[in-house]
Image (tube, grey):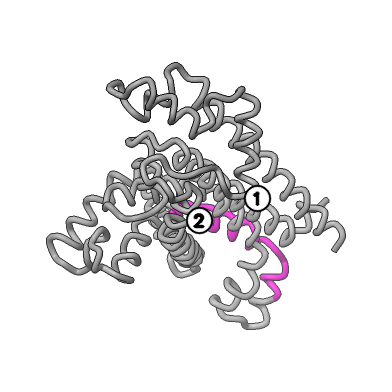
Amino acid sequence: MRRIVAIVMARALEAAGVTLALATLVFFALRLLPGDPAALVLGDQASSAERASLRAKLHLDEPLMLQYARFIGGLLTLDIGDSVRRPGIGAIHRVAEAIGPTAALAGLAVAMGAVIGVAAAALGAGPWLGARRVIVDRVATAVAATPLLAFAPVLTYALAARYRLVPLPGDPDAGALGLLFASGLLSLPLAANVARVSRAALAEVARGQFLSVARAKGASFVRVVFLHALPAATGPIVTVIGTQLGSLLGGAVVLERLFERRGLGTLILEAYASRDLPVLEAAVVVSGVLFVVAAQAASAVHAVLDPRVRR
């Protein structure tokens, strides 16, 4: 137990360090690049007084290191100032409003991708498939290698526009079914990667004597795979899900923009287009935090599940 607690604490410290490095990079990238941030926000037609007022509001007239300390302190207290484009509304508040739809989209996609991928891997491990196991592997490889933008519009046109089997994901009235369809599209690349890794993990576990004993006792194929083999192969599956979360968040940004869905991705693009620096900083840092926390959590779960990692 002490070793597990130590691993979890180490993962938490790593996540904090990576988050600090990301926040630092975001801060200096937006201030050290050529150009006046105030001019970028207000445009070339703004007067000197307007620019000076905005610089004071954003604390751009202070020494750089004082700005940095204020920025880090604001992240710790969840207050880095108001949105430039929507005065009176905090930047963190706008990000918090956008996290909900993105979390629902990505969370459902993770669940669907994990279930579909593991089911496909278990199907590929079936003793009755013979040469057709290769088809499962090839389909998973093809889907994993296909960009989301290549098949999402095609499937949306076919299923939502032409045959009207599902609502358009961007329709405000689409409700839960629209969310389910959008999450299904987002889950396909993850499911393909999970299927490939799960297939390899199950093939490795299949050499274990405990499975031979289970089969000798008359256990069914379903019982052998899901009750005995899958728990032993959980580590690599959890790891691949954690490592794919970055791509999943990127795919969520693409889908939100493609279907005009509310979410963190749409907010980032809107903040960039309108030069809303506080919102842009907060949204980028929060996106990075979500990825870092998810990846470190997956790594910690793998260490807890697999004793070999704890050595």
Is residue 218 something one can see in this rendering?
yes
What's under tag 2, amino acid-wise? Val
Q: CA distance from mark 1 to mark 2?
A: 18 Å
Q: Is disc 1 placed on a helix, strand or loop?
A: helix
Q: Position of 260 compared to 60: left or right?
A: left
Q: Position of 184 compared to 52: left or right?
A: left
Foreground residue among 189 and 62 = 62
The disc placed on residue 194 is: 2
The disc placed on residue 296 is: 1
Q: Which is in the foreground here, disc 1 or disc 2?
A: 1
x then y, percent, for residue 114? 49, 62
x then y, percent, for residue 9? 78, 52
Quarter of the picture holding the N terminus: bottom right
Residue plotted at (34% across, 55% down): 262
Is residue 130 something one can see in this rendering?
no
| Residue at far bottom of view | 218
Residue plotted at (40% across, 42% down): 268
Q: Is residue 159 above or below residue 95?
A: below
Crowding at dot 1, Cα within 10 Å, few <14 / some 14-19 / many 20+, comes out as: many
What's under tag 1, amino acid-wise? Gln
The range drawn in magenta is 190-213
| Residue 166 location, quadrant | bottom left
Label whose residue precedes the other's in the sequence (1 or 2): 2
